[in-house]
Image: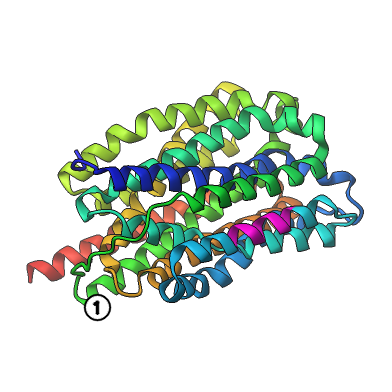
Amino acid sequence: MFGQLDSVELRTGLTLAGVIAFRMLGLFMILPVFMLLAVDMPGFTPFKAGLAIGIYGLTQALLQQPFGKLSDRFGRRPIMLLGLALFAVGGVVAAMAGSMEMLMAGRALQGCGAIAGVALAFAADHTRPQNRSVIMAIIGMGIGASFLLSMMIAVPLATLLGLSGLFWLTAALGVVGMLLVFSLPAPQVEREEILQESESSTIVWLFAFSVFLLHAVMTLLFVVLPGMLVSQFGFELEYHWRIYVPSMLGSVILVFPLLRWMTVNGQEVRVMPMAFLTLGGALILMSFGGSIATIIVFSLAFFLAFNLLEAAMPSMVSKLTGTTGRGKKMGLYTTFQFLGAFTGGMGGGWLLGFIGDAVTLSVAGSFCTLWAIAMLLWLRAVNNRRQT
C-alpha cells in the first residue's frame, strides 16, 4: 500500500524507530507514576509536579528549530548524538534531585535534547515520498511499542527503583539511543518538489496547531487520570497497566487498517477533524467516570485517534517541506508538538488543583471538539475557493 521499501529505507525506519523508542520509553515510564511518586519530594505541589512533567516540552519547543537548522548545516547524525547526550545528562540531574526545583531543572535539561524534528528530517532524507508514510508508521509503531512496554514495567520498576532509579534508567536509555545513531546509514538525499509556498505554509501551520493540541491533551491526560483512578475507583497504581495496555494495544491493531484506507483514498487531511472529535468525545465521556470498563473503552478511542494523527501528520508535513532546509521546517512542526506537551503538563496541573479532575478532562475535550469544528469549517472554505 505504501510502495516497496528498499534496504536503506527499511534500515533507516527500523533504526530510527529504535532510537526514538528508547528515548520515549524513558519518558513514558515517568508519566504514569510521576504524580504519585513525586508527592514525597520537598516542595511538592500539583502545579510544580505538572510543571516538572511539562517543562520538558517547553525546552523541546524552544530548541526544535535551532537543532533543525544546525542539522541542515552540520548533518543529522552529530546533532542527534548531541541531543541524546543532553537527554542522558538531564536524566542524571533529575535522578540526583533533592527538591522539586532540581527535578524541574533535570527535566528541562532532558528537553534540551530536541532531536524530534531532526529525526523526522533524517527519515524523510532517506525515504522516497511514496514510501514515507510507512516509515513514519514504523517510527510510530516503535513509539507505540515503547508506550506499551512502559505501561507494563513502569509500576514494577517504580516500586523497585523509586523515582530516582527511574531517572537513572532514562539516562541509560539515552546512551543506548546514541549507540543506535552510529549505525544509521549515510545520507542519500534527493531534491523534491513542494507545493506553492502560500498553500504549503497554510497547511503546515494547520498541522502545527493540530500537533500542539494533540500533545497538550495527551500530557494533560496523564496528569489527571492516575490520581482519578485512585481517588474515584480505588484502582491502585500497580493495576493501572490493565487500563493502558489493552487500550493502547487495541489502538495499534486498529490504526494500520485506517492508515491504509486514508493513504489509498487520499483522505489524510479530511480524517483529521474526525480524529479530533473522537479525542474530544473520549475525554468528555471519561470525565463522567462510570466504571473501569468504560474508562478502558474511552481510553481505546483516545489512543486510536492519537496514534492515527501521530503517524499521519508528520508524513504529510514532510511531503510539503521539500529537501532544502527540511530540518528547520520540520522543527517548526515539532516545536509546536513539544510546546503542546509543556502546556498540557503545566495547564493540567493548574486546572487539577483549581477545578478538579473531571472538569479538567471536560475542558480538554471541549478544546478538541472546538478544534475539530474549526478544521471542518477551514476545509469547507478551502473547497469553496477551489470551486470558484
Q: Based on the displayed image, in which of its 4 quarters is residue 155 positioned?
A: top right
Point 51% across, 71% down: residue? 67
Where residue 205 appears, as percent x and y from the top left, is 37, 69
Where residue 252 appears, as percent x and y from the top left, is 41, 32
Left or right of residue 250, residue 135 in this image = left
Determine whether the residue tagged by mark 1 lies in a helix, strand or loop: helix
Point 85% across, 55% down: residue? 97
Query: Where the C terminus falls, by quadrant?
Result: bottom left
Circle 1: residue type: Ser
Q: Nearer the viewer, residue 363 or 123?
A: 123
Whether residue 182 is visible to the viewer of this picture, yes or no, is yes
Q: Is residue 287 above or below residue 68?
A: above
Left or right of residue 35, residue 212 in this image = left
Residue 56 is a magenta residue: no
Whether residue 278 is visible to the viewer of this picture, yes or no, is no
Q: Is residue 150 above or below residue 75?
A: above
Where residue 322 appears, as percent x and y from the top left, is 26, 68
Left or right of residue 188, residue 144 in this image = right
Q: Magenta-highlighted stretch: main secondary structure?
A: helix
Residue 85 is a magenta residue: yes
Q: Based on the displayed image, in which of its 4 quarters is residue 59 positioned?
A: bottom right
Q: Nearer the viewer, residue 346 or 94?
A: 94
Residue under pointer 1: 198
Q: Nearer the viewer, residue 24 or 291?
A: 24
Where residue 60 appears, as percent x and y from the top left, is 58, 64
Q: Is residue 189 above or below residue 233?
A: below
Q: Based on the displayed image, in which of its 4 quarters is residue 208 positioned?
A: bottom left
Q: Which region is colored magenta?
A: 83-91
Crowdedness of circle 1 by 10 Å Cα count: few (<14), some, many (20+)? few
